Image (cartoon, rainbow, N blue to C red):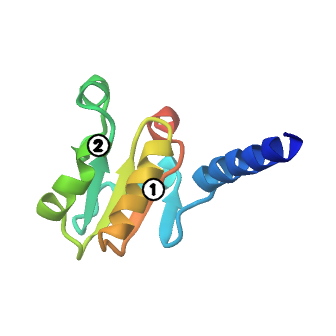
Amino acid sequence: MDYLNYILLAILLFLIIQRLIPVKGVKNISTIELKNELNSKNKQFIDVRTPGEYKGRSIRGFKNIPLHQLSQKAEKELSKDKEVIVICQSGMRSQKASKQLKKLGFTKVTNVKGGMNAWS
């Protein structure tokens, strides 16, 4: 029985660590660095929070595509030729979104560390 507990603990640790490790090929920037990027015309800014969160507080220039709709909408609404900068509330959903975008063939993907919680 102890052996089984060790296996379950190892699997749990693996899953937690996998969530925290940055996605390969995804650039991470701070909200301070984001402020320098906002005027760029050759970048796409995506907020993957829920519509309610987005309406409550958002950054001008960011388009709301909730995480659960990203796979369906990314191909139609985003260009693979431009960098995609992704934000959420804390940085966790945007990290997931970045991973999804990489799998869909987007090559220039940037995640905003700390998300809206770090935005001032």
| Position of residue 69 in the picture relative to residue 7 (left or right) | left
Closer to the N terminus: mark 2 or mark 1? 2
Position of the N terminus, as image quadrant, is: top right
Residue 117 percent coordinates (x, y): 50, 33
- Which of label 2 and label 1 is nearer to you? 2
Residue 45 percent coordinates (x, y): 28, 54
Picture residue at 62% right of the left edge, 58% below the top: 21
Say which element carries label 1.
strand
Residue 59 percent coordinates (x, y): 31, 39
Q: Vertically, is 20 above or below 110? A: above
| Position of residue 89 in the picture relative to residue 19 (left or right) | left
Between the residue at mark 2 and the residue at mark 1, the CA separation in whole angstroms equals 17 Å
Picture residue at 41% right of the left edge, 59% below the top: 98
Residue 14 percent coordinates (x, y): 69, 53
The mark found on residue 111 in the picture is: 1
Q: Vertically, is 120 above or below 21? A: above
Q: Disc 2 vs disc 1: Cβ atoms closer than 8 Å?
A: no
Circle 1: residue type: Asn
| Position of residue 98 in the picture relative to residue 58 (left or right) | right
> Crowdedness of circle 2 by 10 Å Cα count: few (<14), some, many (20+)?
few
Q: Is residue 38 visible?
A: yes
Circle 2: residue type: His
- Residue under numbered circle 2: 68
